[in-house]
Image (cartoon, rainbow, N blue to C red):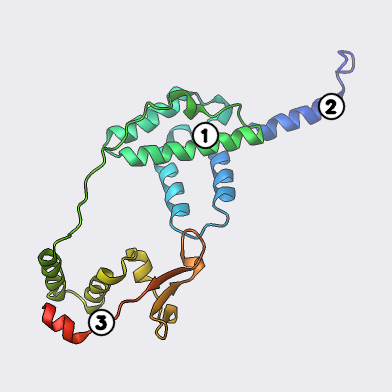
Amino acid sequence: MLDKGINPSAHKQTKKAKQVTEKNFLEVAFEWHAKHYQDSTDNRKKVSLQRLKKYIFPAIGKILLKDIEAPMLFNLIESIQDKGRIETGKRVNSYCSMIFRYGVAKGYCSRDLTQDYKGMLKSAKSKNMPTLVKADEIGELLRDINNYPGTIIVKSALLISAYIFVRPKELANSKWSYIDSENSQWIIPAEQMKLKRDHLIPLSSQNNTKSSQAN
């Protein structure tokens, strides 16, 4: 190497650096996932990794990030959408985009391949999900819930939902300590919320006389 004008020490360091920057998709994905969700405690952390394991890792997980080509990734995402999972395909593509952008920042690849087929993925058709707005329809719903033959816990949760409009998960994980009876409010602590801030829910009062007349 010296005869060829190559510094052995510098060559060794260059080779070592090259090995560090040559990581496969699987390695970079786990590295990105650990950093991206390091402060996350919700279900998104688990779901994102499950989707990558199911749809992406088996096909290109062992390929070096820099050697993956846009058609490889696009065909994988397209196959997800062809099975009717339109939004899942878009979500997985979003994960891959973040992984490649992370790879660019770390020197594992040179660009985000998802930009090569931007605008070519299918979009799910929006559906109109009308709510009940007529008093008689709402009354019928509440009477049906009141006659629900299931457990008292589920029945109570359904009835409470009509007054407070919270997500099922928030209602199911509620604790008595969250309820401020004196001020008629329910405060869900920040650690339970997606935006990591306290969520205040005013609680309505229930008048038995009026409820009887309404029934």
Q: Is residue 161 left or right of residue 1?
A: left
Left or right of residue 9, residue 160 in this image: left
Q: Upstream in the sequence, badge 2 or badge 1?
A: 2
- The quadrant of the rendering that contains the N terminus is top right
Q: Amino acid at mark 2?
A: Ala
Q: Separation of disc 3 and disc 1 at Cα?
A: 60 Å
The image shows residue 111 at horizontal and vertical percentages of 57, 27
Q: What residue sits 61% from the left and 32% below the top?
A: 104
> Which quarter of the picture shows residue 75?
top left
Q: Which mark is residue 28?
A: none
Q: Nearer the viewer, mark 2 or mark 3?
A: 3
Q: Circle 1 is placed at which residue position? A: 62
Left or right, 49 with respect to 87, comes to right
Amino acid tagged 3: Gln
- Does the image show residue 23? no
Residue 133 in the image, given as x and y percentages of width and height: 17, 60
The residue singled out by tag 2 in the image is 10
Amino acid type of the residue that numbered disc 1 sits on in the rendered structure: Lys
Foreground of the two, 196 or 153: 196
Eyeballing the image, is 145 above or below 41? Answer: below
Relative height, residue 212 to residue 162 (above, below): below
Splitting the image into 4 quarters, where does residue 30 fall? top right
Q: Which mark is residue 206?
A: 3
Earlier residue among tags 2 and 3: 2
Q: Residues within 10 Å of mark 3 (few under 14, many from 20)?
A: few
Contact, mark 3 vs mark 1 (Cβ under 8 Å): no
Q: In front: 148, or 187?
A: 187
Task: Please identify the quadrant where the C terminus is shown.
Answer: bottom left
Q: CA distance from mark 2 to mark 3?
A: 78 Å
Which class describes the residues within 10 Å of circle 2: few (<14), some (14-19), or many (20+)?
few
Q: Nearer the viewer, residue 75 or 171?
A: 171
